[in-house]
Structures are given as structure tokens and as C-alpha cells.
Amino acid sequence: MSICPLEFRYGSNEMRKVFDRDNMLRKMIDVEIALLKALEECGLADKTNYSDIAECSREISYEEVDRIEREIGHDIMAILEAIDRRCGSKSRYIHYGATSNDIIDTAWALTLREALSIVREKLVRLIERLKKIALEHRDTLMVGRTHGQHALPITLGFKAANYIYEFSRSLERVIEAEKRIVRGKMAGAVGTMAGWRGRGLCVEEKTLSHLGLEPHTIATQVAPRDGYAELVSIMAILGSQIERLALEIRELMRPEIAELSEGVGERVGSSTMPQKANPVQSEKISGLARVLRGMVVASLENIPLWHERDLSNSSSERIIIPHTMLLIDEIVGTMIRVLDGLKIFPDRMRANLESSRGHVLAEALMLKLTDKGINRQRAHSIVMRISRRAMELNRSLLEEALRDDEVRSILTEDELKKVFSYTDYLGNYRELIDRAVKYAESMIERSVGKSQ
Amino acid sequence: MSICPLEFRYGSNEMRKVFDRDNMLRKMIDVEIALLKALEECGLADKTNYSDIAECSREISYEEVDRIEREIGHDIMAILEAIDRRCGSKSRYIHYGATSNDIIDTAWALTLREALSIVREKLVRLIERLKKIALEHRDTLMVGRTHGQHALPITLGFKAANYIYEFSRSLERVIEAEKRIVRGKMAGAVGTMAGWRGRGLCVEEKTLSHLGLEPHTIATQVAPRDGYAELVSIMAILGSQIERLALEIRELMRPEIAELSEGVGERVGSSTMPQKANPVQSEKISGLARVLRGMVVASLENIPLWHERDLSNSSSERIIIPHTMLLIDEIVGTMIRVLDGLKIFPDRMRANLESSRGHVLAEALMLKLTDKGINRQRAHSIVMRISRRAMELNRSLLEEALRDDEVRSILTEDELKKVFSYTDYLGNYRELIDRAVKYAESMIERSVGKSQ
Amino acid sequence: MSICPLEFRYGSNEMRKVFDRDNMLRKMIDVEIALLKALEECGLADKTNYSDIAECSREISYEEVDRIEREIGHDIMAILEAIDRRCGSKSRYIHYGATSNDIIDTAWALTLREALSIVREKLVRLIERLKKIALEHRDTLMVGRTHGQHALPITLGFKAANYIYEFSRSLERVIEAEKRIVRGKMAGAVGTMAGWRGRGLCVEEKTLSHLGLEPHTIATQVAPRDGYAELVSIMAILGSQIERLALEIRELMRPEIAELSEGVGERVGSSTMPQKANPVQSEKISGLARVLRGMVVASLENIPLWHERDLSNSSSERIIIPHTMLLIDEIVGTMIRVLDGLKIFPDRMRANLESSRGHVLAEALMLKLTDKGINRQRAHSIVMRISRRAMELNRSLLEEALRDDEVRSILTEDELKKVFSYTDYLGNYRELIDRAVKYAESMIERSVGKSQ
Amino acid sequence: MSICPLEFRYGSNEMRKVFDRDNMLRKMIDVEIALLKALEECGLADKTNYSDIAECSREISYEEVDRIEREIGHDIMAILEAIDRRCGSKSRYIHYGATSNDIIDTAWALTLREALSIVREKLVRLIERLKKIALEHRDTLMVGRTHGQHALPITLGFKAANYIYEFSRSLERVIEAEKRIVRGKMAGAVGTMAGWRGRGLCVEEKTLSHLGLEPHTIATQVAPRDGYAELVSIMAILGSQIERLALEIRELMRPEIAELSEGVGERVGSSTMPQKANPVQSEKISGLARVLRGMVVASLENIPLWHERDLSNSSSERIIIPHTMLLIDEIVGTMIRVLDGLKIFPDRMRANLESSRGHVLAEALMLKLTDKGINRQRAHSIVMRISRRAMELNRSLLEEALRDDEVRSILTEDELKKVFSYTDYLGNYRELIDRAVKYAESMIERSVGKSQ
């Protein structure tokens, strides 16, 4: 069967491998073996030859586990049974004192550590791509748009720097949340460590240090579910941010605007309209971001479990955790490819900026009038009046201002002309780009430090 | 790769087959062939031997289509290309005048017709199971609970009848919504049917009647997306209703209550607590219902597409439509199995009812006082007073009432004793059960009529 | 205090009055009085003078009820207490045999009947506005856009007709769902009608017929919550559809496109950019639709209540039901106003259509080639080739086609020129507009019939 | 009008004051005045007497602003106009170079700083309440429940410590996220600071330091919306965690369990069932948590704004930000009150623990067998067998174990009896409680440090 597009269409192989059932099974066996070591180290089990057990359990496949699960109706017990059948008495102490979710939650921690490392690494690459654009197009003039309407001049580099900042905030969020998300749980059936005869803290410490994990401070049968809800929330935030950039590209690729274009290469645009070249990669991102947002709902509902846990989180998480990570993986990965192929048209940017014939500098005119002694509120109403008249009569704002008696009583022709310079009205864009890049670099450094 | 549990763990094979890529591909080819026939019938194409094309395209696999898609970047064009490569000039008019979403949306209609038929059929089975319980346990006394607290006596049959009503409302909803969801779209690239030289209405009518579908009244490049949002919404409503029954079972299986039990057979309850028998099937339903609710969010966001459509719904729907249908399929199917194995303990029901020592009949006492001339509000406060005292002193409500001077000045001992009969305080439960069953039967009849 | 914008900023006064606490209180008293009448008619209460009770309870304010609720901690009991204090023994049988949610759910039915009538009436007005545009601009040429890219010619009337269809589907949905949503519940503390000594069906029938309502077939302490979830879902669907139109306007008002404009009148566009004229009404709709979608989540979670009910739906519904109805009311009302003031620029539509220099007729060329004997797939690749070359060289598609040897070997110059006519490539748009209008009219008729 | 329950029913007055329109208006005027100071300090404006402006704008009410807004259709311009009308030429430079969202986003930062401080302070109080329970009931035995079924013994203190840990994780999250949420934005119409003639960094730095805020690194017309989405997400996580505790109380207050009880005092439980004492406060929390989760959806959708911003976030945030904060405020506040009045019944805890007649120590028996040389898997199957038989025959697990030949061949009667001690099977609960308390204390310290 082939149904879920995350298995064959969306997501990288790298991420798919992390959440493939085979990797999950391997991780669970790794946890069982780490526990066996710890049991011995803490004096709860006889000497065991771990490499033997690693060896005899190596060939266990999830198909085999599935078969046993169908007999006995319990997934972790099926793994233990498979180990038992293959390893026999060597695995006598397997799972001693542990509960299924000691294994499952700790295995989630291991897979999520891998998955988050992939996300962080790709996010860094995405930020680097944007940095390149920000620096190369630091001074490429274009119009800033608010409400879809022309507002004031900006540069493409400045626009890119905003995305750098936003994505770096997500990177910061991932880095900070990771300590709450990637934690092992090794505390037995209700969290008291009762099965380990008083040596539970030892077992926990040893098991998790073999796996390179910190433990949860306390737990019930399961690790607290707020960690997974935080994971899904921040991935949905990141996905929505990247959707913002996707939307930017889709809009700026409209033929009436034509400032950017997804490079389409030989790609067919439409089955019936041969002329079409569509922003399909960016549109795909928009669609997947919606699915990702929907995952948050389920992740939040998983928090209020009964007492020392009920099972309702389990079926839900089997779906939402891998889906969330594959969705974000596809979203980030696609955006990297889109930026790699992105075509930029500075001439069109300039033309669009100029198309309003100076109206995007109305603020500059208003402030100039204020500087000359007019109340800012009054200046606003003067400029609003002449701007609307100019648009009606299809004149440039300068032209209309020059014809306006009230304005002319305050500003000379020369002063007026000086107002209408795009490049002089870009404010502190250069410093702001630098600030964004600097912030991004500090986050990238933290992220790289984490992965090493 | 094996990642998404809907491919191997949740959902029936029957439903999986509907959304398997192979079935989707077959459906799309069916639509193309129906269009070819229509083109000929409407005089837009030369005579074609459809069985030839059906023949030469039969072996096309999605792997083959995938390979072509990787070259040209367009899924429907890849199918056309595959047909072209295999059928050559026989398929000269393939896709003439159509756009990709004429094929995709019409194929969705075909698969959803199959999928909804499965859902309706299973829902009918579920209602039948409940009807059996309602009739067999029409008079099985138990306590009605509000806020988790004992309220008034009911019967198990009455409880079941409420679920019958609720699920039948969903059945009604599915039946009524189906005409908005299962509709073909055959109208070309922007919905005007421009490619068919004025004979578009003929092409639409013929194509869809070959497939047994009604058309959308008008469309853009795509069918309006509110239909899919309605689909996902009503499936999420149904899933949440079944979760209500799952929650009922989970609660009534608590050892302190023990009125119902998921039959566990030889199933292992816990990897470390051998005594455990857990309501794992019902808990699974709770978890999956959460994921289902999250799908609604994405389905609603797919509605506001740009102009004559943008592509953002596409990636989203590839995931949420099959996932929604497989989730509801697993939820309904699991509940049928749970009811099949359900153990019912009338003795425990009786014992729990009686455990409050008559407090669940406090209303009856209050109304009796009202009948005797006391203001209802005053009677409420009298009974509240003696009830709280009785609880404090661990007496039955009758005992306390008999000791109370105010009550005794109004009611004789004999009158009081008559008040405290559980079976006399069940109201019109029998007629209400009958009403629910009758309503269910009328919906089942409509559903069966639809499927024939 | 003044915090929630739905109290002062969004929503009509008409709708606000429906959900004002005062109206809710009146409705609840109405239900209590209808019940009193029914109790007498069914022989359960002595003759009562209802006009007396209506009279003595007329002045009860929610402030008064609030004060009592703070003493006793129960909202409905506080109303009963207020009636008791003012009416004394006249109200002796008030609430006899009823439970709080008999009153609350029936009062919700009464308010929702009012609220849905407002929504339907406004939705009809909205559809009428669109009908006017569809008919006036039936032939106003513009470009159809898919993926934000130019696709094929359409007319503004055709575009409007699609919205007519989509909104009429919502009208149909509301009409059909109303019978599940607007139903009274009068069945006592656990739904068995136990308090009415076997005459419960009489009490239910009489009470609800005084209020003009049909009963739920069966109930627990409360009406089943799927009705409210369906209400919120279909309102969210409608809100998302209207958002689609809002988005259309926002996009077509971009200065580079400028085909439509929200009339801004004297409205200030920006506090600092005097030139700005922004689509703020349409943007408001987009924002509110998001909030509305979020309400669905809570409404679905309210379905799985415990046993014969728990209280968790109560606090949730106090918020989401009024908020949902006020949000949709503001969304529909705003869109009516936007359409009333909408400016349409047919010249710009024409100019944009022509700006691609014939590329939007690439499909027509491809089909012409197919008619002449070329395989459709082959024709697609020919036209794709010349279209991309034409764009590169900034030529019209006709120009490039005329230069292309392969095309010229198939089509004469004359034939080619005939292909490039916008008005000849509009397909069956007129009949489709008519179909949409006809469907809308049948829904409007059903809606008006309902309200009378 | 009185519609939204957050205005009169839910939320503290303290929090309501923060989001009252009057406070929002004051905050916005504060920002305008801070900007005026900064303009002067940076040499962009003449000397101004701020206290004069503070004085003349003090009396501006939102009713006044509303009236002006109705004329000119812009909220911030209406405030400026009101200031202008009252202060005249004194306010000549008001809003110079700023855009509306410089004021709005910075005012949000100021209100959210207040609101988060309230949340943190209440959350600390909630944790302190739980700490008291954890320490007082450190050794109060009760049964741990998984799947609603009896699992192993725990103590009430251990249960409380888990909530301490979970809530402290939320406190950590709030503390860490606050730096991303509470930031000022002062950068002009598209974020370039163009209006301040190169001195934008000075204006930003001065304005925000007057208000005690750090700036966003870079911005468009608005601060990036991921901050608000993170805010709503982590509040929804916290709300869901508290719902978990509410659910715990609701369940443990069932009469069949009766281990905890919301103190109901003189509260009426039901309008018709005088005996009822219901967990209505905890149920209210469950209901409000659902509404809160729904807010997340809207907050995420607000992230992908167009270009340098569109307005769609505005209407949405006016609703979701105050509603989110009032909802969480009511949820935390209610839980504090619930804990203050909570009744704890250690006898019932003990009785329920013992009711399973030793089955909750099945794990202990299994591990004992393992210690004696039996494979753990084999031991599991032995104990599962005797446990199920014991339940069937209604025997204690010890009794059945003593009768079992296989067990008796391994363990002596004496050894067996030693296994069945509840207090000996609590593992490291004391150290784990201490760990949770210690972690909580370190978070409380960080939180208190922040507020000073």
C-alpha cells in the first residue's frame, strides 16, 4: 500500500530514515541494552555480555515484531518476546523494572534529537541563503508594501534581513526548547522507580548517560506531554514563518509584479495551458504549513492525560510526531531549493517602485512640512489631500505639490524636489541588516555548538 | 520506508485500497476515458476505441508515472505522457479541453463515494450493535451520572439509545452532505469550458454520467473547497461522538466502577504489570479522534484560494483527505469490535446505583414535597439540607427524611417509602428508546437506499 | 470594563441584542413559563396565571441574578430564586421536574433560531449583491488567474457567479443543518423525564410547541453537542468562503493590478503615509475568519462529554456560541458593505488581460493543432516551446506562432489569427452564470420559506 | 451590552484592567510621549514640555477616540487627532516618523509585560500550593493509575510533585519566551526608520529605554508575529497542563473513588437534584482550556503576513490576545482556589489501594521471580496467569500465588509475603519529590528575579 505522501512524496530520505519503523525499533532495542548495562552497573543484574545481545537482536525486523504483537496485543512486549526468542537466557534481565514508556519516550528522545539536528542544520542553511541575498542585494531598491499597497522604498536586502531575523528567532526557540523535549524517561510503571529496589536513581543515571541523554526530573508512567506539544507548536511557528516567505514569492511572481520568480526550468506548468510557469514549490509550502498547524491541536489535547497516564496519547503521537517532523523537513528543504533557483529582477523592482510617481514618498513630504513648522497632523491632512487629487488627475506627487498653493507657501521648488529621492529615504536599513545578520550568526553559532 | 501508521496499523484494508495510489491512478484514468467518450459523443473527437485505450493504459503503474513526473514536474501531465507512450495515436484526444483538476476533483469524487459508502455501512453496523444493547438492556438499571456524580437512575438501554440518536444524526449529516461533496468537475482550465467550442455542457454531462456523478453548478479551475471542509468537519464530529462512547467505556471500566469492560482476551496489558487489563481499544479511539480534529483546521484553510485557484490546497489535500477517511474508518471499525467484545456487569450497575443509599432519588422527594403544596424552591432547599446531613452522618436519604420534622409534617412514612423506588423513577425511558430506534431506522433506510 | 471587541467593535447591534445577557435571561424565563403552562395542561400543576408570572418576573435583571448566583453558586437556581423572590407562591411549580439544561439548551435553540435567521437573511442579501454584479458584468472581460498567473479569459460576471454558487452552498448547509441545531430539550435531569410521573412526553410536547420548537428525539441531561459543533463548523466554512472573496478584492486592489477597489471615501489609510488607500475592510474579514476557524476546535472537543453529561461544555459554549455568531455576522455584514462600495475598473481588467500578449490563449492554439491532427500531448509540447521562446524574446504568442515553421506547416496565418480572440474563448460562461443564479434562487426561496 | 463572559464572569479584575480599552489607550499615549522625548533627545524635535502633553491628553477617553475613528476610519489617527484637539501646537511633533504599529506593538509589549507578570506570579502561587500538598502528603499512600486501572502504589505527594514539575516547565517556558514576546518596535512605516533622517537608531533606543523595553532586531511595519503565536501556544500548553490537574480532581471526586473533593460549601449542585455536589470549578477549567487551544490556530495563521505587513492580524489579535490572557488568568486563578478548598481523604486512598487485594504488586512478584533466576519474560507470563485466575476467583494475588505450584517451587511463603508490602514498593519517590521541588524553586527564583 502507498497512501501517505510523507512516505514517498514529501520529506527527505534523511528525515524519513529517522522515523522509519526500522530506526524506531533499533532505538528501542538500544534503550533496552543501555538499561541492561545499567542494571549490571547498579548491581541489579548479573554480568551480561551486551555485545551478544546486540548481536542476537540485530536481525529482529518490525515484521517479526508485528507478527508477535498480533498474538499478544502489546507492542513493547512483542519486542521483548522477539529478543527472548532469539537471545534466550542471555536476555534474562531484559526490561527489568522498566515500563514500556521508559523505552518509548526515551526512544522518542533519541529520534527527536536526530530529527531536530536535521531541522536545525537545514534552517541554518536556509538562513545562510538569505544572508547571501541580503548582502548581494543590500542596496537593490524596491517598493515596500503594506496592505498590498505601495508604502515606502526599501531594498531587497532589507526584506531578506527581516526573514533572517524571523527564522533566527525560530532557531533560538528550537535551541532553547530542546532541553525540555529531548530528555530520557527511565522511572518504571508509575514513575517511582519501584522495581529497582532503591537503586532507581542509579539505573536512570547510567542508562541515560549511555545514551547521552538527561532525565526528566520526575515522571508518571510517561514523560510529561507538554514537551511534545511545545515541539509541534514551534515547528508550526517555523512552518508558518516559511509560509510567509513562500507567500512573498508567490505574490512577487504575479505577472503584473514580476519582481521574483521561482525558476521553473523545464517544468510543465499546466496540463492544458502550455504557457504557464507557476510558483508550485512555494504553493506546496503554503499547503503543507496548514497541515502542520492542524497537528498542534492534537498535540495540545495529548497533555491532559489521566492520573499516572492513559494511553490516548499513544495512537495520536505515532501519527503527529513523525508527520510534524517530515512536514517541517519538506517545508524547510523546499524553501532552500526555491532560494537556490530564485530569479530576481531588479529592473522590475525599480519600475514598480517608480510606478506610483512619487506617492511612496508622501511621508517624506509630510515630515518636511512638519519640520517647517506645520503640525504633523495638519501636514498629514495637506498631503493626503494633494495625494488623492494627484492620483485622480494621474499626476506625480511632486507635480501636484508644486501646483499646490499651501505647499508652495512653505516649501520652495528646490526643497520639494529634494524630498523626492528614493535612495535618500531608506533610513537606517544598512545598520538594521547588519543587526539581523549579527543576531543570526550568534544563533547559528549556538546551534553548531549544540550539534558538536 | 514505513512511517505513517495509517499504512500498516490503523484503518481497514478495504479503506486503504480506496486511497492507495494505485486506485487513485485507476480512477484518474477512468475519468480520462469517460472524457474521451464524451468528446466523441459531443462531436469534438473522432471515433475512438475506448477498450483499446483502457487496454493499453491498464498496466501503467504509479512508479512509472512517478518517473515521468520527476522529469517534467507535473503529476497529471505525467499520467498523460504515460498513456501517450503506451497508446500512441489511439489517445490522440486524451485530456482534450480539460484541465488537471477536472481529472483530480472528479477522481476525488469517485474515491470519496467509495469511502463514504464504507463509512455509512460501518456506521449502520455500529448503530445496529447499539440497538441490540438498547433492546437487550432496555430495563437494566444503572445510575445516571452528571459531572461524574450520581444523578438519577437510568437503564443501560436508555444510555445506549442516546448514542444511537447521536450516531444517527451523523448518518443523517453524511447523507445530506454527500450531494455537496461527491460531485464531478469537468469545466476546463478556469471553469468556462472554453476548450470545447461551445459544447462544454454536453461534454460535462456525458463525462459525468458515464461515471454516475452530478456536476458542480459552476466551478473555477477547481471544485469549491467547502465540500472537502464539510467532509472533514462531519467526520471529525462523528469521530468525537464515538470518542464520547469510548470515554464512557474507559470510565465505566475503572475498577472502582466496573460496570463495563473491553474484553481483553489473551491480550497483554502491560510490559511490566502482569495484572493489567486496559481499555486500550477505547483509548486508541480517543487518541485518533484528536488527530482527526486537527485535520479540520487545514481543511478550512484550504477554502480561501486565490482567484480561479491556487495550488496550495493540493499538497494539503493529498494528506488530509486520505488521513481523515482512514482515521474515521479505524475509529468506527474499532468501536464495532469493542462493542462485539464488550462485557456488561448488571450486578455492579445495580450495586453502584444503590451505593448512594437513595440520594439519587432526592429529586423525587423534592417533587413529592412540591406536590404536597410546598414551593418547589423551598422544597429544593429542604431536601438539599437533609441530603447533605445524611451524607455527613452516612445515613440513607430515606432514614434522614424520616427523622426530619419538617418533612414528616408533610409526608407520612408510607408516602416517603414509596418515593424511594428506582424502577418507579425512570420516566418515559421506554418510549424514548423507541423514538431513538425509530429515528435510527429511518436514517438507515435512507443510507441503504443511497448505496443501492 | 470594555475588553472584547465583539461588544463594541465587531458585529451588528441586531446580533449583539440576540446574545446580550438580557435576551438570554428573557429567553430562559420564557422557557420556564412555557413549561409552567405545559405542566398545567398535562395535569401536573394547579392552574396558574401565567401573565401574572410574566409580569412579576419582567423586571428581573441579570445584575440581580448575578448577585444571587454569587451567594449560591448556580446560575439557573439564581434565576429561579429571583422569580421566587418576586412572584412568591404564584411560581410554586416553577421548574418542576426540569433540569437546568432543559432551560439552557432550549434557550440556546431560541437564540440560535434568531441568530441563524439574521445570518440567512444577510447571506441572501450578500448573494443578491453578487447577482447584480454577475448580471451587470456578465460580459466584462478579464483574465482568469490560476497560481496567481494568467490562465485564460473569463468575465467578471463569471467570477461573481462562482461566489454566488459557493455562498449558496453555505445557505443550503445552514438550511439543512438548522433542524439538527434548533431543537428544544425538555427531558429532565438525565433525560428520562422522570420528574413528570409518566407524562413527560406531554410536558415536552406542550412546552416546546408553545415555543415553536421541535424536541430532540432523546437526550441525556443535555442536548447532544454535535449540533453546536456542526453550527460552528458551517459558520467557519462560510467565513472562510467570504474570506476567499475578501482575498480576491485585496489582491485585485494591488496597484499593479488595480481591477477592483474597496471604496475608501474620506477614510485615512495610514497614520504616517498620507497617500495610502487600503483594503482594510477585506483585511478585517481575513483576520476574523481566522478567529472563527479556531472556534471549531473547541466546539468539537465539547462533544465527548462524560456519561449523562459533564459541565465542561458550559464555560466553553458561553464563549464560543456568541463569539461565533457575532464573528460571522461581522464578516457577512462587512462584505455586504464592501460590495456596496466596490469600485470596478473594466479598462484595467482589459489591459491586464491583454498584457500577456496572447499567451492566455495558448490552450486555444494547442487545441487547434489537435483538431488538425496533432496528438494533444505533442501539441502541448509545441505550444509550450513557442510560448517560452515568445516570452523570452518579448513577442506576442501570435507573432511567435507565425514565425514557427512547425506551426505554420499546420495552420495558415488566417487560421492562426482566428485563434487569438478573447471573446471567442469564453466557452459556456453565460449558461454557467445562469445555472449559478438559478441554484442561488432556489436556495433563497427555501430560506425565505423557512423564515416565514 | 454584555455578551463576552470574559468581561464579567471569567478572569480577575487585575487582568481585566490590563486589557481594558482604557489601559490600552493609556499605554499608547505613553508610547507617543516617550517617542516625543526621544525625538527631542535625538535632535529631531524642538524642546517640548512633556508634562504638559501628558496633562492635556490625560482626559482622553476611548469614547472620544471612537467618535473620531468613526469619522476618519483609522484608530491610531483618531488618538492623534484627539491629542491634537486637546493639546494643540504643544503636540506638534506627535507621532513624527512613526507608524501606527510602532505604537500598537510597543503598547502590546507593555500590556503583555504586565499580563505575563500576573501569570507568572499566579503560577508561582499555584506551584507553592502544590508544594505544600507534596510535602504534607509525601507519604500518603494511594494507588497509581494507568489507563484508569490500578497500577502500582504511589503517594499523594509524589502525584503532586509531578504537577509541580510540569507547571514549572511552563514557568521556564514563559521566562525564556518573554524576551521574544515583550519587545518594542519603533522603526517606522516599513521598518527602515526612514522618517528620522538617519537618527532612527537613536530614536528607537531612547523611546524604548524610556519604556524599559528592548527593541526587535529588525522589523517590517510590524513586529514579527511569531512572538504572539509563541505566547498563545505556551499559554495553551499551560492551560492544558492545568486541565490535567482539573481532570485528576474531577475523576478522583467520583463517588466510587472519593479520594479528593472540591470543597463545595453552600454551593447548590443542581437546580433539580438537591443532593448534588459537583466539581464545577474543575469542569470550568476543562471547558476554558478548549477555548484557549482554539486561539492557537488563529495566532499561527497570523504569521504569514504579506510583504511588509497586511492588516489581517489586527482584528484577529484584538480578540485573541486579550482572550488568551484572560482565559489563562481564569484557569490559573480557579485552580489556586480549588486547591485552597480541596478536601483530601487519605482513608479512601488507602481503601482503594487495597481494594485490588494485592494485584497492584504483581510487578513486584514478577521481579522477585526474575531475581530468583526465571527469565523476566517467563516471569511475566507466570504472574499474568495467576493474576487473571485470582481475579476470576476473587482471590488476593498473594492467596493465588501461595496456591500456585510453579511459584511455590521458587518462592517460600515467607518470601512471598514480603513481596506484598505497599510501603516497600514506592521506589525513590522521596528523592524524586525533592528533585521536583528543587527544580521548581530554581524556576521560581528566576521568575521573581525577572519581576523585580
Image: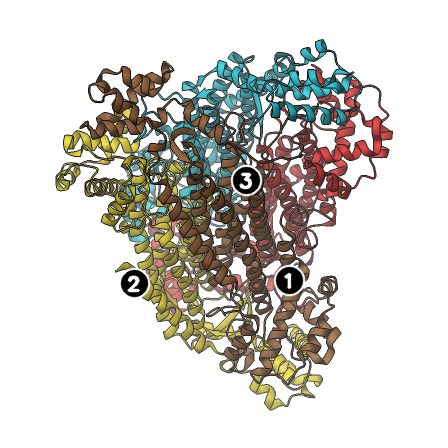
Chain colours: A yellow, B cyan, C red, D brown
Residue C442, quarter of the rendered image: top right
Residue type indicated by callout 2: Val
| A288 relative to D94 in the view: left or right | left
Classed neighbour count for the residue bearing mark 2: other residues with Cα under 10 Å, few (<14), some (14–19), many (≥20): few
Residues at discs 2 and 3 in contact (Cβ within 8 Å): no
Could you give the CA–CA distance between mark 1 and mark 2, rounded to whole angstroms? 42 Å
Residue A222, quarter of the rendered image: top left
Element type where label 2 sits in the image: helix
Residue type indicated by callout 3: Ser
The residue identified by callout 1 is D24
Element type where label 3 sits in the image: helix
What subunit carries mark 1? Answer: D
Residue type indicated by callout 1: Met
Could you give the CA–CA distance between mark 2 and mark 3, rounded to whole angstroms? 41 Å
Name the mark on residue A448. Answer: 2
Residue B249 spot, x, y in % from top left: 47, 25
Co-location on one chain, circles 1 and 3: yes
| C212 relative to C164 in the view: left or right | right
Residue C61, quarter of the rendered image: top right
**Name of the residue lying farthest toward the front:** D414
Which is more toward the observer, C150 or C402? C150
What subunit carries mark 3? Answer: D
Classed neighbour count for the residue bearing mark 3: other residues with Cα under 10 Å, few (<14), some (14–19), many (≥20): many
Which is more toward the observer, D354 or D64? D354
Residues at discs 1 and 3 in contact (Cβ within 8 Å): no
Residues at discs 1 and 2 in contact (Cβ within 8 Å): no
Co-location on one chain, circles 2 and 3: no
Residue C119 spot, x, y in % from top left: 68, 43
Element type where label 1 sits in the image: helix
Which is more toward the observer, A449 or D424? D424
The residue identified by callout 3 is D286
What subunit carries mark 2? Answer: A
